[in-house]
Amino acid sequence: VEMGMIAAGEIDLLARLASPTVGVITNIGPAHLEFFGSMDKVAEAKGELLDNLKSDATAVLNADDLFCRTLEQKFGGRIVTFGIKNEADVSASNVRQERDYADFTIIASNDRADVRLHAVGMHNIYNALAAAAAASALGVPLEEVKRGLDAFSPIAGRSEVREIEGRTVLADYYNANPASMDAAIGTLVSLSSGGKAIAVLGDMLELGPAGAEAHRAVGAFAARSGVDLVITVGALAKLIGTGALDAGMPKDRVLEAPTHAEAARLLKTLSRPGDAVLIKGSRGMKMEKILEEF
């Protein structure tokens, strides 16, 4: 039941019983563009999952994803959709996000169940719906789905909320791509509630030629979203700062840290109890080292 609880856009799950009976594509995101070159190619590669499902299997797809219709056309078997914005077989309503959990109602067919998910961010609600849709396709009752999701706890470094010296820290450094960066920034702002929202952002790797513009776009999104301070770590992440400045963020609120230790020092100096802090970057950036010294 918890198998869909994965970082948005990072893994497509093939649920295996005696044979592949359910295939889940969480979304089509801008990850690994270095290898695939375009979003269309990413969708084509992820769609290979559907090519390998048997005709009597079920494909679980995100109804809110732009590529949903394209993927539906690739598969002639049963399709179960999940979503929040568009009509879907499994959906969520009454969404309420708190500091370290989200409450929502899962709706599947004529059945409903109230869930408390111990994870933050809309992307994790989507992952919960993907898990619920896969379980539903396998005939699991919604009450059992609810029990599994209620019992879920985040993996270290994936949308993990910590309290450190009065700061609310969103440790989300397991990996990063433009979509997951934007999702984490949105979650950071929602967690700030009166304090400052501070984003410590590292390089997003494996984006190829699209990397420079993708980093600038993340910076612009941070500025527009109401982030109070951006600290960048890494040569590519410096372009996040450029994007934030170009979008109107004041120069004194965009800082570059040459090392993890310097990023930790800046956090100690510039943050206060009540602030919310996001630590995020690609796995190769080892952003957890910042928390080790914070």
Image: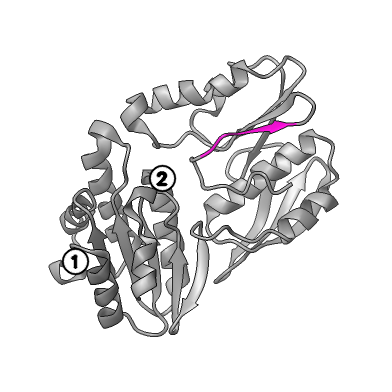
Front-lying residue, 85 or 173: 173
The amino acid marked with disc number 1 is Leu
Please, is residue 56 above or below residue 176 in the view? Answer: above
Q: Determine the residue positioned at 24% across, 60% down.
A: 232
Question: Which residue is found at the position 41% from the left and 73% from the top?
Answer: 276
Residue 146 placement: quadrant: bottom right
Label 1: which secondary element: strand
Q: Quadrant of the C terminus?
A: bottom left
Magenta stretch: residue 14 in it?
yes
- Density class for disc 1 (Cα within 10 Å; few <14, some 14-19, many ≥20) is some
Mark 1 or 2: in front is 1
How busy is the neighbourhood of tag 2: few (under 14 within 10 Å), some, or many (20 plus)? some
**Where does residue 57 sit, x and y in percent of width and height?**
74, 22
- What number is the disc on residue 179? 2
Residue 84 vertical position relative to residue 206 in the rendered view, above or below? below
Query: Residue 118, image x and y in percent?
Result: 63, 63
Q: For the magenta stretch, what is the residue range?
A: 11-16
Q: Which residue is mark 1?
A: 255
Amino acid type assigned to the residue bearing label 2 in the image? Ala
Question: Left or right: 256 with respect to 188?
Answer: left
**Residue 48 placement (x, y as % from top left):** 55, 20
Q: Is residue 262 left or right of residue 184?
A: left
Residue 3 x, y percent position in the rendering: 67, 44
C-alpha gap between disc 1 and disc 2: 22 Å
Contact? badges 1 and 2 (CB < 8 Å)? no
Q: Is residue 155 left or right of residue 9?
A: right
Q: What predominant SS class does the magenta segment belong to?
A: strand
Secondary structure beneath disc 2? helix
Specify whether residue 111 is painted magenta.
no
